Amino acid sequence: MIKLPPLPYAYEALEPTVSATTMRTHHDKHHAKYVDVTNQLAAEKGLEGRSLEEIIAEAESRGERKLFNNAAQSWNHAFFWTCMTPDRRDPSGELLRLAQEAFGGLDELRARFVQVGADHFASGWVWLALDGGRLAVVDTHDGGTLAHQAQTPLLVCDVWEHAYYLDYKQDRKTFLERWFDTVANWQFAETQLAAAQGGGEAWRFERAA
Ligand SMILES: [Fe+2]
């Protein structure tokens, strides 16, 4: 069994960028449903008791699309909650150096992140990742995930409509700009970066007994 992880802050903590109404629906309904379906299908496929990362990899190798999508969405959302904070501070140090190297600076990284997210067709995710020692902005479709890829995810923003429609209607670009400027958790991104460079453990979905 995997468990729906609690939000690491109050529902209203990210207002006005993300409303409490959006957070309640997103976490308590959407994320909860992905977790429920993952547990149901994992049990049917003989994968109960496995870590979520193992379930994702196994579902993909077996071509079990419904299980893969729900398991990956369970992982992506848990990672996404951690990628936001009410106590934002600017990135610094190695992360800033890599942003300079890959994009020319933090403003350029922001522009790229917002553009990739805004241009993404239909549902998916926009990620900041470390790919071969270099920062990259990549998008994945639907339940696509970096959970089991060679790239290390540093940050992700959900660009499914359920992430922003109640607050921004169709204006995904403004959502992404405000998200990047006000709630992106750079301290977490720096922890992920350090882990990718051999300094500690990368984030994992907490395994439930
Ligand atoms: Fe979502």
Image (cartoon, grey):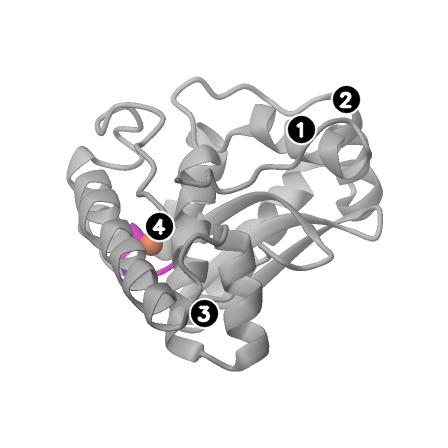
Q: Label 3's element?
A: helix
Q: Label 1's element?
A: helix
Ligand 1 is within 8 Å of the C-beta of the residue at disc 2: no
Ligand 1 is within 8 Å of the C-beta of the residue at disc 3: no
**Circles 4 and 3: CB atoms closer than 8 Å:** no
Point 22% across, 56% down: residue = 169
Residue 208 versus residue 6: which sits nearer the camera?
Answer: 208
Q: Mark 2 points at which residue?
A: 93
Tell me: residue 35, above or below residue 45. Answer: above
**Residue 147 horizontal side relative to residue 149, left or right:** left
- Give the foreground label among 1 and 3: 3
Give the magenta-colored segment's residue range.
159-163
Q: Label 2's element?
A: helix
Residue 56 versus residue 73: which sits nearer the camera?
Answer: 56
Q: Name the residue under label 1.
A: 190
Q: Mark 4 points at which residue?
A: 1
The Cα atoms of the two marked residues, 1 and 2, are separated by: 9 Å
Residue 8 pos. (x, y %): 36, 26
The Cα atoms of the two marked residues, 2 and 4, are separated by: 39 Å
